[in-house]
Image (cartoon, rainbow, N blue to C red):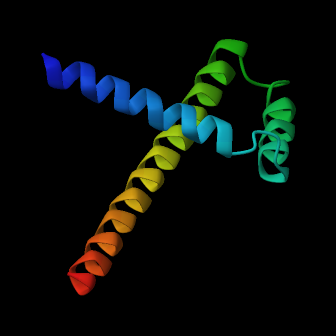
Amino acid sequence: MMNTKVDRLFNYTVIARLDDAIPLHTEEWQQVERLLNQISEFVPTSMLNSVTEAIISYADDQARRGYLLGQEDLVTELKKKASKIA
């Protein structure tokens, strides 16, 4: 049970860090918004909302995974440097 709380806290910390560091209003996202607005004329709103949520969820997950990989790489690099010093 304790690991679950720690995992949730860690995931929250990662998400908060990403939210602070990654700009939300980028040129790439503006293009996505324009396309979503265009297709909203032909697609039911509920389906459009589902697609938007899926895109956001996917992007959040990819950002989280990238952050974690970067942290793992940093730890590996620091361990290498520490072993050279010792």
**Residue 12: percent from left, percent from top:** 44, 27
**Residue 84: percent from left, percent from top:** 25, 86
Left or right relative to 62: residue 80: left
Q: Residue furthest left?
A: 1
Q: Is residue 60 above or below residue 53?
A: below
Q: Is residue 67 above or below residue 33?
A: below
**Residue 35: percent from left, percent from top:** 82, 40
At x 12%, y 16%, the residue is 1
At x 46%, y 38%, the residue is 14
At x 60%, y 34%, the residue is 56
Left or right relative to 73: residue 28: right
Left or right relative to 41: residue 15: left
Is 46 or 42 nearer to us in this picture?
Answer: 46
Left or right relative to 38: residue 52: left
The C terminus sits in image quarter: bottom left
**Residue 20: percent from left, percent from top:** 66, 37
**Which of the 4 image quadrants contains residue 82?**
bottom left
